[in-house]
Amino acid sequence: MDELRRAAGRAADLMADHFGHIREEPVWRPVPAEDRLWLTAQRLPETGRALDELVEDVRSRVMRHPMGNGHPRFFGWVNSPPSPAGVLVEPLAAALNPSCAGGEHAGPLLERTVVRWLADLVGYPHPPGGGLLTSGASMATIVCLAAARQRAALQDGWDAREEGLSGRPPLVLYVSAEGHSCLRKAAELLGLGSRQVRTVPVDAAYRMDVGTLRSMIAEDVAAGLRPFCVAASAGTVNTGAVDPLDEIADVAAENRLWFHIDGAYGAFGVLAAGAAPCYAGMDRADSLALDPHKWLGVPVGCGCALLRDPASARAAFSLVPAYLHDENADELGWFSEYGPEQTRPFRALKAWATMSHLGRQGVGRLVNHTAGLARTLAAMVDDSGDFELLAPVTTSITAFRYRPAPEITGDRLDALNRAVPAAVQRRGGAFITGTRLGTDDALRACFLHPATTEDDLAVLLAEIRAAAREIGW
């Protein structure tokens, strides 16, 4: 135990030093050949190594090459910095190392509270047992769509689990053109087939076109297909757009469709001042996917599936062999009955610690601060003369492009904005990623870090200009 205590103290110091000096470091840097070789090609040692040696390897080989998302000028994808409270308790969850499939111990009991807190934060109705933590929103989406598939089958008088999908009218899923790729992946994994995933066009604000959705459903019904689910977005990854949720809920109700909302990144945006009207209808969803490891900063590996009717997920997944029967379980059973995972890690501890440390007010401040940064950057872009805003700001994402001269158009403008992100990343002063909006290559900045300032936004624009000059623009 002395060896563990000594090495753990050193690891704690490394963690604190990492947090304390992160702003002084480059946001990202390429991994040199020597470290890349060590990371990818080392051999398993024949004899065990001392804990102190392992901590030193982590210090010298691993922590020198972070993804960059802990830095206040990391604006790429939707990757938050880790909550210090979440980081603090992760080793304790590992020390307990329970399986949170169920049973009478702290892990699954605390998960009940965490799921209830998450539902309460975003204003989603939470019946007892109406949700579970997952590895992320991708797995949460699989849980929700599996529940939707099973409900549709049972409504039509058959059992998808028992019979499979063969010989039945194809089940059709409707997603926005801006919907996340995890929806298509889930449809493919669940045997629906990507051919049965309908892509609904978006309007000028990148929100699902509800009129077209209605028409597509009617066409599929006339063709003998079985529409079963529409998946809306409460904050897309490209622009942060929130679909017209109330209108989509009406369409779902009229057509017996399961109404799913992908709120992985954006659902917590409902807490921003004045944002609630954009989210009207979110509480009408049959299911809602969240990612506490995004906007809330819970360390990666914590998503959540919320369900209006928990029995739907239980019908899709429950399987209790004799060796897992628990005479002491309550009427809700085990978490493993509501999703595909049997052995489940103690995700609730880091989520509980993060939300407890922030409190409701702290979560609100974080959302308001980061959403405000997105609006501020949009204003800076509008005032700049050499940048263009490409989409309205709804959450904490700003989509824009660099245009240093008005005569740069078409393919040349696209080529410039495709090249800029990698050039900015290599410089190390900021980190931004690109995307495509309609026919335009674009830049997008996502704000999730509580320590990001307006000065950091000015650095970002300066880094884009400098990077463009470096690559010959």
Image: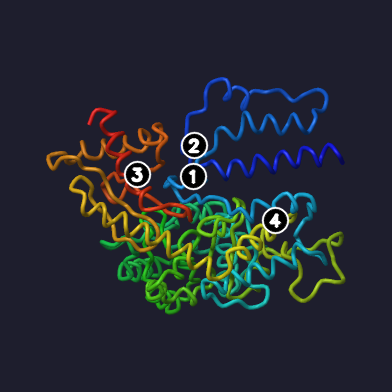
Identified by mark 3, the residue type is Leu
For marks 3 and 2, the one nearer the N-term is: 2
Q: Is residue 1 left or right of residue 130?
A: right
Nearer mark to the viewer, of 4 and 2: 2
Q: Determine the CA span between mark 4 and mark 1.
A: 33 Å
- Helix, strand or loop at disc 3? helix
Q: Nearer the viewer, residue 209 or 95?
A: 95
Q: Nearer the viewer, residue 339 or 48?
A: 48
- Helix, strand or loop at disc 2? loop
Give the residue pinned by disc 4: 341
Eyeballing the image, is 178 above or below 387?
Answer: below
Residue at 32% from the left image edge and 52% from the top image edge: 399
Q: Nearer the viewer, residue 250 or 11?
A: 11
Res. 341 in view: yes
For marks 2 and 1, the one nearer the N-term is: 2
Q: Determine the CA span between mark 3 and mark 1.
A: 13 Å
For marks 3 and 1, the one nearer the N-term is: 1
Give the residue pinned by disc 3: 460
Residue at 79% from the left image edge and 55% from the top image edge: 98
For marks 4 and 3, the one nearer the N-term is: 4
Q: Residues within 10 Å of mark 3 (few under 14, many from 20)?
A: many
Eyeballing the image, is 427 above or below 125?
Answer: above
Q: Position of residue 8 (x, y in %)?
A: 75, 41
Labels 3 & 2 near each other (Cβ < 8 A): no
Quarter holding the C terminus? top left
Q: Determine the CA span between mark 4 and mark 2.
A: 39 Å
Nearer mark to the viewer, of 2 and 1: 2
Looking at the rendering, which quadrant does residue 319 occupy? bottom right
Q: Count every numbered label the image shows and give the total.
A: 4
Residue at 83% from the left image edge and 67% from the top image edge: 104
Q: Residues within 10 Å of mark 1 (few under 14, many from 20)?
A: many
